[in-house]
Image (cartoon, grey):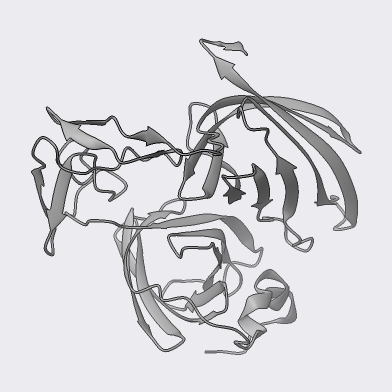
Amino acid sequence: MPMLPRWALRLFPALLTVATSANADLTGHWHVEIPGADPFTEIVQTGTSVTFTLTFSGSSLVFDGTVSGDALSATSNDGPCPVGVNLRILPGETVMDGIDGVYGGPCTYPTKSRAFMSRCECHDGNQTNGDGCDAECRIEPCFVCSGEPSICTPAGDGAACDDRRDCTTGETCSAGVCGGGSAVVPCVDLTGRWFWTDDSTFGVFQSTSDIVQRNGILVFRQAGGSTLRYVGTIDASTGAMDLEIPSNALFCTDPVKLTASAPPDGRTYSGTGSATVESPHFICLDDSFTETGSRCGGGTID
């Protein structure tokens, strides 16, 4: 790997880290959300070394890197400009969130964009919903998938199934529908649409987000779209949340962090956060904020 310029090291500080704790095992197929990239990749891991290929507009870039604790860092020199990916591995090793960036060569001004990967439960090579392996390579409720590529068949009545909700257990299939089961108590499930307000150093901001909660992982997106906001964890038994938005700024690389909690009814949440805002002159300005959220229902706020 060529020596990176100092400013590139600021973009990808995890490239300098040395493993100090148990490392994740990322081997397998992953669904990819990176602007311009094809939707799937396969990670091959040997020890702490990883390799995977991302394809952009028909051009394949091979990435080589390392896993260190809860971080994956990899670079590719197969394109006209070096490209780096720096991802945070969330608990459970099913979701990774971070930044990819172009940082040199003929591309004199670095660019950074959000990078998000989720582990595949199946892999049939397409993005078709309804065939048992959905567009994000997850096994659909009341299907059984096996093989490589995956072949999926409907599960019979009475078969155990997963309705993809954290607060139910013991669901079974009936006429192809996953249901029944019993409630997990105590349990907070924030899946749904939310109206949120940020009261920050730089003003008050309001918008709506769609939240998906799965296996203790929260993913916030702009309502009705795919744009990512927070990604993090929730303790479903208490409603305690730790959330981050990775920075796509050039020099001010600290993530936005929000520590929040939701009550047992799962209808609101509130918390405090911190961020670093990069000025046009590359000055890093500290910001602190409070965020409150209210669950939407039927097009109105509950």
Q: Name the spot of residue 169 as percent of width and height, x first.
A: 36, 41
The reply to whether residue 61 is visible in this rendering is no
Q: Position of residue 298 (x, y in %)?
A: 51, 10
Is residue 159 toward the left or the right of residue 168 in the image? left
Pick the quarter of the image with the C terminus: top right
In the image, residue 146 sits, relative to residue 135, either above or below, namely below
Q: Is residue 78 left or right of residue 293?
A: left
Q: Is residue 244 left or right of residue 144?
A: right
Residue at image position (54%, 45%) is 218
Residue 292: give x, y in percent of width and height. Answer: 75, 30
Q: Nearest the camera: 3 or 128?
A: 128
Which residue is located at x 48 percent, y 26 percent? Answer: 224
**Image quadrant where residue 128 sits:** top left
Residue 28, relative to residue 208: is it above or below? below
Q: Position of residue 110 (x, y in %)?
A: 64, 64
**Can you say whether 182 is above or below 138 in the image?**
above
Q: Is residue 168 left or right of residue 218?
A: left
Kindly indicate the quadrant of the structure image that contains residue 251. Answer: bottom right
Please tell me which residue is depicted at 42% across the width and 89% down the height of the picture.
47
Residue at 60% across / 84% down in the picture? Answer: 21
User: From where the camera sits, is residue 260 visible?
Assistant: yes
| Above-or-below relation of 244 to 22 | above
